[in-house]
Every structure is written in C-alpha cells, then in structure tokens.
Amino acid sequence: MTHSTQPASGAGNDKGRSRTKGTHRRAFLGGMAGTALAAVTAGGTAIALLTNATQTKAHAAGTTLTIPDLLEGTASGGTTTYTLEAKTGTSEVLSGVTSTTAGYNQSFLGPTLKWTSGDTVLLNITNSLTEDTTVHFHGAHVPPSMDGGPQNAFASGKTWSPTFTVKDEAKTLWYHPHALGTTAEQATHGLAGMIIVEDDSAATAALPSTYGTDDIPIILQCLATDTAGEIKYNLTGYLANGLSFPLLCNGTNVDATTLTFTATKKRTRFRLLNASPSDIITVQRGDGGTLTQIATDQGYLTEATEVKSIRLVAGARAEFVMELSDAVTLEAVVTTGWVRGGSGTYEFLTVTPDASDTPEDLPALNTITRYDTSGFTARTITLGQSGTSMTVNGSVGTSMSSMAMISTTLGAEEVWTVKNSTQLEHSFHLHDVPFQLISINGADPTGVQLGWYDTFEVVGGGTIKIAMKFTDFADDTYMYMLHCHLLQHEDEGMMAALMVTES
Ligand code: C2O
Ligand code: CU
Ligand code: CU
C-alpha cells in the first residue's frame, strides 16, 4: 500500500484503489509546510480523547455517495427529543490507513438532524470522550444558554440537555464542538453533523425535500494527516513533515475516487457544508455549466440564482439544485490561504440522472428586506495577531476572562466593520442572528451576496461591513461568540464574547 506523503510529489493518485470515473485531477501547487519550520515539531500533539475506540464500516471505501443517517427524534408532549453521544472510533481518512477519529453516535461525523420551524426540540447529548466538550448549533437562533458555546462545556461522562423552540426558517445548519482550546482537535477528528431546518413556506414546499433521494447533504472536509493517519489540527501538527491533505465527502476520501449518485428525481437539491478546519472550498460543475443556488448560510435567496461556482469558507453552507439530462461531475477546488501552501481540484461526485418526472418551475423563494443601516449603531471588530496568538480587538480569546466582550442590548441594530489587520485569510462567524453584507472590501454586495449569512470570508488586509439586529434573546450570564472559523485561529484566541442583555 502506497500513498502520497508529499503533497507536491504528484503521487497522490497512486492510492492502491482504482479510479472508476473520468479523469481525476489533483494538482497540488507547491507546499511550504514542513520544511524550514519542521524543527518546531516535537511530536507533542497526542490527543486526550482517544479511548473506548469502536470500529465501524460506515465510511469504508466505496464509490457510492454515503448519505449520513437521519436521526429520528422521539415526539412526545410537543417536544421532539434527539439523542447524541460524542465518542471516539476509527475510520479510513487517508486511503488504506486507519485513523483514530470521533463522531456522534458513530465513529466519524454525526447523523443529520431535521428540525421543523416552530417545534420545540430537546437534545440529550452524552460526552463519551475523555475530555470536556460542548455542542454548538452553528447558525441557529437560540438562547445563549442553549447555544453550546464554551460556557456550556460539560465533562466526560456527563449529559447536556439543551432545549429550545426552533425559531429559524428553512436553512442548513450544522453542529460541532466549541469548548475552549479543543474545538479544532475535536471537530477535525470528526465531531460534526448537519442540521436541516424545514418550514411551511411555499419555497420549502416547492423544493426537493426527500432526504437522501432528492435532498442530499454534502459535507466536505479537507484534513491534515500524517502517514500513520494521525489527524493534525494545531500549528505544531501542521508543521510536521510528510503530511497529506485528504478531501473527504460525507466521510469518504475522494483523493482518488469520484463518488457516484443516481438522481431518481429530475431536480436534486444539494446542501453543501464546508466542515474543514481551515480551507476554502469552491464547488463547480466539471462541464463548465452553472449551479442553481437557492440558499446561503441563513436560508433562501430571494430567487434561484445561476452561479458559476459556490465558494465556501470554513464553516459556511450553501444550497443549490441541478436538473440534469446527462451525467455531471462536481468538482471541489480546495484553496489553502494558510499554514501550508497549495491547492487542489477534486472531482468528488458524479451525478447521473435516471428520472422521467417534470418538475414545476421554482417560485420566488424569499423576501429579503435590505437593512437601512443609517440609524444603526456602528462598531469595529478587528481581527489581529500577536506572535502566534490570534486576537479580536487586541484581546487573545483563549479564556472567558481574557477574551474581548462586546456588550449590546436586546433589540439593538448594529453595523459592524470587520477589519482583518493580518495578512492571513479569516472566516468571520457570528452566533445568534443572521447578518446582511453591507460591503465587501469596499464594494457593494451583488447576487447571492445579498442573502443572509452567519460566516463570511475576510481576506488578508480586507474589510467587510455587516448589519444585524439582536432579536429575541438576552441573558446576563451566558454569552454568544464571534470568531474566526479557521478552527486553529479560534483556539489560538481569535474569538470574542457577545453579551446581549435586556435593554
Ligand atoms: Cu461553527 Cu462558534 O461556531
Ligand atoms: Cu456558530
Ligand atoms: Cu482566522
């Protein structure tokens, strides 16, 4: 069994597993990591969560797209209850190599949760790791005490049971750990899953919604692993020699395999999640055609919008539909603006149509009233760096007491200038409420940028302006977070607290 240990070697296709479809391109363009700074690596990156390993075949090599299980809730007394267990296991992250991984209810990744807008949900989440964890509902508009931020961390062996009413409209959310200092470690090992919110809107009724048939989750992750399959998640780990950077689609390595999906309905909806710790992933059609984008992070666009590609920073989501007459291969272009150099294009999924139905034209999807920010309170959020520490407004957010705190009041309307004073790429994420983009590096937003977001790219030296309203929830103990969604940056302190109190 051979596999590439040097991303730049061009040997990445020789994985001992035959290719099944088309021509596979995997072009790494150089690699900076692991040369000059290799001496920093001391091998001191052993992680603490590795016991009680179980092995499953859920993500064994194969060419059919794996659809994550849908976790059925139990409805009773007006509340739907879901049971999750964070635990460790093993999985094939690098082709032919067994990695120690973690997942919810399984060895890698977690089941998809489906919530209905207006319902009350209760999650019983058990921590079977050997260290603290917490589960954050990324993008959900929930009370700060239920948000799963660092203040909700709970110990090994404990169960945390958040409950709330689903206030979100239809959208694609996700869940992942958020304890201080261990988010990158836990999420990169596989603790992540998708949440689908459904509502009773005309758009939802018109769009494909049969999970696994015409409503398809696509979780993309570019991870760093060493030749033994150990997943790297921090600076020391990323500077090791001989790393590979496998791309996974729903937990399956697509470095040398193009997955297949047969579309039995003419129109298929895809929900993209970039669950990578750092990389930017751009999804496009291999034949140069357009994707019909219907949603951004925080729900439907005003109307279905033809786009050449969909660019997702770490943590971001988007939805699109395709109506195919011929097979189309989807490509993921992985861009690393970060510790390692290089990028690659992966043909990760071939969709083959086998349908004879004729879908109705899509209706208008949503009404988005653009904020008039003239009366909004202005604030500046500066993403900075001090040595190997990362900062927000000058503070290193590695503990609740050291992080910057943004204080606001219920009902506040604000416009934030999010300024990247570093040369690194950041992925700015705000908990609690969706935001609108007001400007991106001085330019007005256009097209899909006019949708709702919770996570957006801030390029090195760049600035975005965003506007939001702090509705529904206030608390004087529990805080929301705002941070870079490059998980290493988050763990290194690029995180601040947001306290929303009663006015
Ligand atoms: Cu997806 Cu504060 O996180
Ligand atoms: Cu979040
Ligand atoms: Cu960052």
Image (spheres, helix red, strand yellow):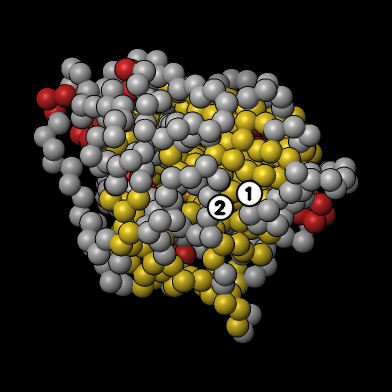
Residue 463 locus on image (x, y percent): 50, 25
In this view, the residue in front, 347 or 466, is 347
User: Which image quadrant for residue 1?
Assistant: top left
Q: Secondary structure at mark 2?
A: loop
Q: Are marks 2 and 1 in contact (CB under 8 Å)?
A: yes
Position of the C terminus, as image quadrant, is bottom right
Quickly name the residue at label 1: 216
In this view, the residue in front, 35 or 162, is 35
Q: Residue at x 61, y 84 (%)?
A: 77
Residue 146 locus on image (x, y percent): 47, 65
Q: Secondary structure at mark 1?
A: strand
State the mark number for residue 67.
Answer: 2
Q: Is residue 425 above or below residue 471?
A: above
Outermost residue on the top side: it is 30
Query: Which amino acid is tagged 2?
Result: Ile
Q: Residue at x 63, y 20 (%)?
A: 443
Q: Residue at x 67, y 23 (%)?
A: 287
In this view, the residue in front, 114 or 413, is 114
